[in-house]
Amino acid sequence: MKFFIDTANVNEIREVNEWGVLAGVTTNPSLVAKEGRDFEETLKEIIDIVDGPISAEVISLDAEGMIEEGEKLASLSKNIVIKVPMTIEGLKAVKYFTKKKIKTNVTLVFSATQALLAARAGATYVSPFLGRLDDISHEGLQLIKDISQIFSVHNIETEIISASVRHPLHVVECAKMGADIATIPYKIFKQMVQHPLTDIGIERFLADWEKAQQK
Ligand code: E4P
């Protein structure tokens, strides 16, 4: 399973990219709004940092508008992936972008039927939202498992991005269930690195080393 970072904050992207673990970036309108910066300017900076797929979401609700916005965003770099919502209009836009060889990420996927439809329209990625399903007492991880099984049985090449990831255990379970990618917020990346026994181990090694030097 590959790791994308789910943020529009360039400092967070720069830092995790330096760790050598980052395969791509996902943004959404809420994440971009949180940064209070110009969208295109932000995307250009991200493009300069990460050499991998960068999802940029359209705001229009009709296919025509999505296509217009998407083409403009896609012209920024070959790495831009057009993120469209899982609606009928979104599917039409995905069909168009697929013909034009522009990559797409169908977002706000909450059922296996939606994922299958998006894949059949030609989506490069589908993004099932784990945490938001958990929030309403539906098991988000079961959705990842179902989509993963369906795509594997039918040899569907669309990649599954586990989205709305809320804690490190989500990451572990998504990996076990066969998600291709997890898009992870910065805070969770930091949590994934930490283990108290690692810290204790380093402390002990250093203390033993110091002791030996004094002999
Ligand atoms: C995915 O592409 C979305 O940007 C994101 O994972 C949504 O997560 P949230 O439910 O925590 O807002």
Image (cartoon, helix red, strand yellow):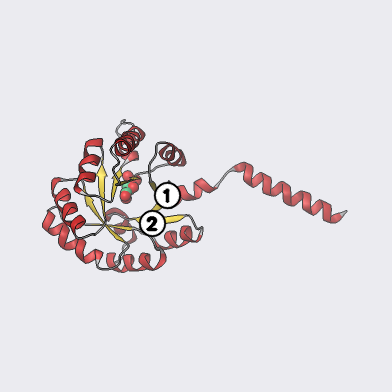
Q: Are marks 1 and 2 in contact (CB under 8 Å)?
A: yes
Q: Residue at coordinates 29% horizontally, 53% vertically from top-left?
A: 30
Q: Position of residue 11 (x, y in %)?
A: 43, 62
The disc labelled 2 sits on which kind of residue? Gly
Residue annotated with mark 1 = 2
Query: 21 or 206: nearer the eye?
Result: 21
Q: Residue at coordinates 28% horizontally, 43% vertically from top-left?
A: 156
**Circle 2 sits in a helix, a strand or a loop, which is it?**
strand
Q: Residues within 10 Å of mark 2 (few under 14, many from 20)?
A: many
Q: Which of the 4 quarters of the picture holds residue 148?
A: top left
Q: Which of the 4 quarters of the picture holds residue 113?
A: top left
| Residue 190 vertical position relative to residue 111 in the rendered view, above or below | below
Residue annotated with mark 2 = 24
Q: Residue 120: which disc? A: none
Query: 165 or 32: nearer the eye?
Result: 165
The disc labelled 1 sits on which kind of residue? Lys
